Image (tube, rainbow, N blue to C red):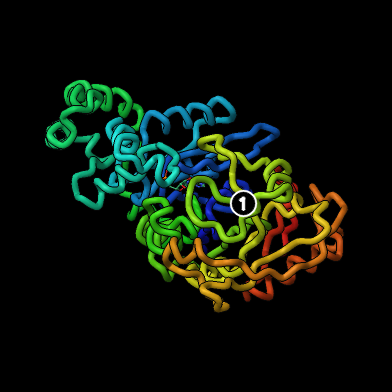
Amino acid sequence: MSATAILGMQWGDEGKGKITHLLAREADIIVRFNGGPNAGHTVIDRGKEFKFHLIPSGALYPEKTNILAGGMVIDIDLLQREIDTVTEHSSRPQIYIADTAHLILPYHRILEQIEGSAAQIGTTKRGIGPTYRDKIDRTGIRVGDLKRPTILQKKLAAKTDYLKTMWPVVEEIRSLDVNLLVTQLQESAAPLLPLITNIPTLIRKGVTSGKEILFEGAQGALLDIDCGTYPYVTSSSTTVAGVIAGGTVPPSALDRRLGVIKAYTTRVGNGPFPTELTDHWGKRMQTKGGEFGATTGRIRRCGWLDLVALTQMVYLNDLSDFALTKLDVLSGFEKIKVAYAYRLDGEEIDYFPASAEELAACEPLYKEVDGWEEEITGVKRLRELPAAARRYIDMITETLGVPASLISTGPRPEETIMLR
Ligand code: IMP
């Protein structure tokens, strides 16, 4: 038996999709445990590129079980489209959906726009925040409600009545028609109903029968609702805590916590980013790394690796090992910087401040290391890397105190150095 959590250690977009797709070859069950269509996991399979927003990155293996677990928020129309895309490419994926996951409904997207969080935080506008808010508020509609039309109708009537009293002048809210909403939901949900089930039982059976299970994180630790750069975060638990609660797996079963770390840092949306580069080096990372949001197409902000943030996130997630991705993007940088500490109010600090305001006031203190000229895209062996690239990996490993088990040197599955 073995269960592995694959977790982003930065602000998302670390390359978790590729790593999950790669490790899924050896797995039986692949589980998404948090977030929803705010994620965009890029997977390349037999030369074709997919961007998965909802279905786990193991979906391209028809014999594997893919689970959308209870910690997720789900747009069922989008889910159906993703299932159709995979079915056209290979064969119908085996998917199960948690009855406890929450539904993203049209009014969630409307609320996100009219309340202003989309602009303030720079969200993905997929209705993520308002859906999780309803969950916490205990007024959410769960996937399991789709199986009980009378209850669905009752809950939606209460919800839409409430929204109409709160937003009487907003036409899109005032015109919400509960009967139409229920009819549309039932139509969209019909093909998915047989896939809705009790996921804790499925996971327990997997664990006890010795199956290999992968938990695929969405976003990254720095976007976590508790540990991230609040309020510039997403609304779910992106860390190992989210795997346990949202993926419904006992901590003792989770014997590997694999962090995914990009060789530099990126961030989409607003919020503090101490090592951000606004000069031509940042532009170069952005261009060479193809740093555009997979969900929104927005340009990702780019900067140097931040070992202060990473040290804290490695600790909080109790990492056993990590995958270093996009190392090839750093070829051609004569010198590479990494932040080893911050200066805050004239004092050197070695921790990651909890407050966004404090973090924004931090000046990174850098260590500079040699870069390398050679292109390394597609390199599969450590010894084929330039000495400076190996020293860069060693420096990260030594600082974080956990071993690197994979080095990714390109987007394709085969462009990987397997170290473990
Ligand atoms: P939300 O998750 O749409 O509410 O967006 C909240 C913040 O998280 C915004 O800064 C988004 O850009 C960011 N975010 C959400 N999902 C992802 C992701 O998968 N990768 C990178 N950033 C994300």
**Side of 154 where 80 appears, left or right:** right
Please tell me how many numbered marks the rendered image carries.
Answer: 1
Does the image show residue 217? no
Q: Residue at x 64, y 67 (%)?
A: 339
Q: Residue at x 30, y 43 (%)?
A: 131
Looking at the image, which is closer to me, 45 or 122? 122
Q: Secondary structure at mark 1?
A: helix
Looking at the image, which is closer to me, 161 or 377? 161
User: Would you identify the image quadrant in which residue 164 lies?
Assistant: top left
Does the image show residue 144? yes
Is 286 rendered above or below residue 232?
above
The three-letter code of the residue at mark 1 reads Ile
Q: Where does residue 145 sit, x and y in percent of width and height?
A: 22, 38
Q: Residues within 10 Å of mark 1 (few under 14, many from 20)?
A: many
Looking at the image, which is closer to me, 153 or 14? 14
Q: Where does residue 359 sit, x and y in percent of width and height?
A: 49, 64
**Side of 138 where 355 appears, left or right:** right
Q: Quadrant of the C terminus?
A: bottom right
User: Would you identify the image quadrant in which residue 372 lies?
Assistant: bottom right
Q: Where does residue 394 sit, x and y in percent of width and height?
A: 74, 70
| Residue receiving disc 1 | 19
Q: Residue at x 38, y 53 (%)?
A: 236
